[in-house]
Amino acid sequence: MAGPDRRWFLPDLDEAVRWCEERNRQGISCSISPLGEYVQDRDASRDAGSECRAAVRAVEAHALDASVAVKLSALGAVFDRDGCTAHLGRIMAEGKRRGVGVEIDMEGRNLVDFTLAAAGRVAGEGHAVTLAVQAYLQRAAGDLRAMEGAGIRPRLVKGAYLGDTRDFGLIQRQFRAIAASLLSSRTPFSVGTHDPDLVAWLTAHAESRDLVEFGFLMGLADQTKTAMAADGWKVSEYVPYGRRGSIYEARRVQYLDRLRDLGRSPLP
């Protein structure tokens, strides 16, 4: 059996720290993320919460230009939402105490309402939080309004789970419409996309380079990351690590397969 593809993630936190230090030297910030999702027991969710807090402490200890990204399903959202909320609160408190930003990944549709509510709760408690909004969901515009009302920083993505449509052109149009709304309101936001069309559209329409941060995955768009950072754009890289990466890796492979079926390629 083949081992994991280290193109997509690193084995442990120490390696993630070293990777981020090198990216920081290139002018690229990082969002480090302990791997693991959809856990089914309290021991696993407690361990995931501890790992996220360890990542926060590592960011501070090494003075990284980095945030920590968490998945609520790793904290027990599928079986113990009160417990998940408590774990998230402890992670947010650790981040606030140490001056480290925390981002919440948006997952499948069954978790969108809970994730919005959880992010709104911690934002209401005075924590700075970033949350993904998924352009392949018809509800995305409404979700964005809710996030803006709650003071949550948006990260616009197409979506990596099961959405309302697989129509690539429609998802692009919805992505551009949401991005145009954010640009017109001059709301600082980040985007996560490797689509050459969308990146070209954003760089052409962003009046200020301070408004948009371009986020890319580890393992993709390496030339683009370094070139955009050298050109003065805000650039970040999503850096997952850990032993539980099979589901994450499968989504990355599925994404590339989907692009190949469409006759398209991600940014180099």
Image (cartoon, helix red, strand yellow):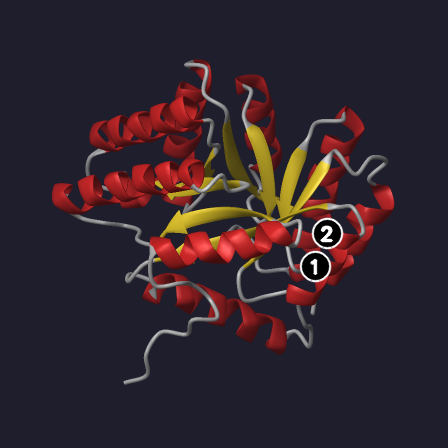
Residue at figure coordinates x 75%, y 34% from the top left:
210
Give, as a three-letter code, the residue at label 1: Thr
Marks 2 and 1 in Cβ contact (< 8 Å): yes
Can residue 4 be seen at all in this image of the molecule?
yes
Residue 190, percent across and down? 64, 40
Q: 160 left or right of 184?
A: left
Q: Which residue is mark 2?
A: 229
Indicate the quadrant where residue 106 lies. top left
Residue at figure coordinates x 72%, y 51% from the top left:
229
Indicate the quadrant where residue 212 lies. top right
Q: Which residue is mark 1?
A: 226
**97 above or below 172?**
above
Residue at figure coordinates x 42%, y 71% from the top left:
6
Quadrant occupied by the C terminus: bottom right
Front position in the image: 221 or 42: 221
Residue 23, percent across and down? 58, 55
Cα separation, mark 2 vs mark 1, equals 5 Å
Quadrant occupied by the N terminus: bottom left
Give, as a three-letter code, the residue at label 2: Ala
**243 above or below 74?**
below
Q: Label 2: few (<14), some or many (≥20) within 10 Å? A: some
